[in-house]
Image: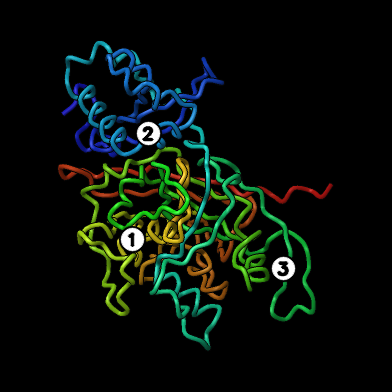
Amino acid sequence: MTWLDVAADHPFGITNLPYGIFTTAAEPERRRVGVRVGDLVLDAAAAAHAADCEYAVPALSGPTLNPLLAAGKGAWDATRAWLVTVLTDPAYREAVEPHLIPLAEVTMHLPLEVADYVDFYASDNHAMNVGKIFRPDSPALPVNWKHLPIGYHGRAGTIVVSGTDIVRPSGQRKGPQDPAPVYGPSIRLDIEAELGYLVGGATTMGERVSVDEAADHIFGVVILNDWSARDIQAWEYVPLGPFLGKSFATSISAWVTPLAALDAARIALPGQDDPVPLPYLQSASGTGAFGLDVQVEVSLNGTVVSHPPYSTMYWSPAQMLAHMTVNGASLRAGDIYGSGTISGPEREQRGSFLELSWGGQEPFTLADGSTRSYLEDGDTVTMTAWAPGADGTRISLGEVSGTIRPTAPEA
């Protein structure tokens, strides 16, 4: 229970407590770490100072979450325990209450300064759908897919916060029947519904992070939309993989759900016994390679078009992190990695329009009667997600939204 007037079943209740970066109209240049509880935002550093928790102030002083990410898991656990204490013990009310701000009075910003960005390809349903669409006469899954988490290194500088408009990208494209490539705006602009993982606790080059150690480096989770220009991607991706078809923009939710808030959402992975992963991708404890019971909802212009279930993902976030460092690549506070498109076995669970429209062959219909295969200018995509929380609660992971704007005119 909390002394705040917040319902026990509020999706941003005391069992959630996500972090974000906010400003107010009174101080538009001062970015601060906020913790959401109900429909209020706690100015975390100010509350820590007022409640005589000075050890937490440096990590919570902003203007990004990077100092908190760098502080490591011990600090994350201690800070979360302190937040629960001051928001539930009435003895702290007088000190803390003045630092609670109505949600409607804050503006949210990108929660971190992104160090590196990697995006994985961890859903076998998505990978098989893509294979069937693009390689109908070949095996749907690449030969290496169930041996390792496949990924690509993305562009950290174009990760943006929810609500940021997305300008339609331009690039080269060449259809199967075109005699030569052409240059122009993408005509097959798509989305990918994903979760993103924020990393803390830096490592040195040459150091590996095991599956069982991975959770000590995963601070929290965001909803992630990996915008994708399928026509640009199709022409460029052989032999080195995604480049301009992906690097123009990636959107993430403003609120970061702590991994600790998702303890009740941990589930076993689907069977990984054919083949059995190599030892470095296995958990010695038996619990390190966990899945998550997170339900995602994708809306286009207000019409819900898909419900991708994260519970069906083949590779664990811990296995992704272990694979990312097995060659000795270092971690930095502020790294983020995406899960890859979340898709379930049913049509209404597909996490990209490429799959929903089956490569454009089966357009889907919106509530206003219009149809889509890919995104049009003016379209708004919104993704939300929820998961089971502690004590039988349901917690929200917030939302990530973006509206497509026309290609900028050539200079």
Q: Earlier in the sequence, mark 1 or mark 3?
A: 3
Depth check: 316 or 279 in front? 279
- The residue under label 3 is 173
Depth check: 255 or 268 in front? 268
Q: CA distance from mark 1 to mark 2?
A: 24 Å
Q: Name the element at disc 1.
A: loop
Depth check: 366 or 185 in front? 185
State the image quarter where residue 268 is shown: bottom left
Residue visible at 39% across and 74% down in the picture: 147
State the image quarter where residue 18 is shown: top left
107 w.r.t. 362: above or below: above
Nearer the observer: mark 2 or 3; the answer is: 2
Residue visible at 55% across and 20% down in the picture: 28
Residue visible at 44% across and 58% down in the picture: 324
Circle 2 packing at 10 Å, graded few (<14), some (14-19), many (20+), is some
Q: Going by the picture, which residue comes out furthest to the right?
A: 411
- The residue under label 1 is 316
326 w.r.t. 39: above or below: below
Q: Amino acid at mark 1?
A: Ser
- The residue under label 2 is 71
Circle 3 packing at 10 Å, graded few (<14), some (14-19), many (20+), is many
Q: Name the element at disc 2.
A: helix
Q: Which mark is residue 187?
A: none
Circle 1 packing at 10 Å, graded few (<14), some (14-19), many (20+), is many
Q: Amino acid at mark 3?
A: Arg
The x and y percentages for residue 207 are 41, 52
Residue visible at 50% across and 66% down in the picture: 364
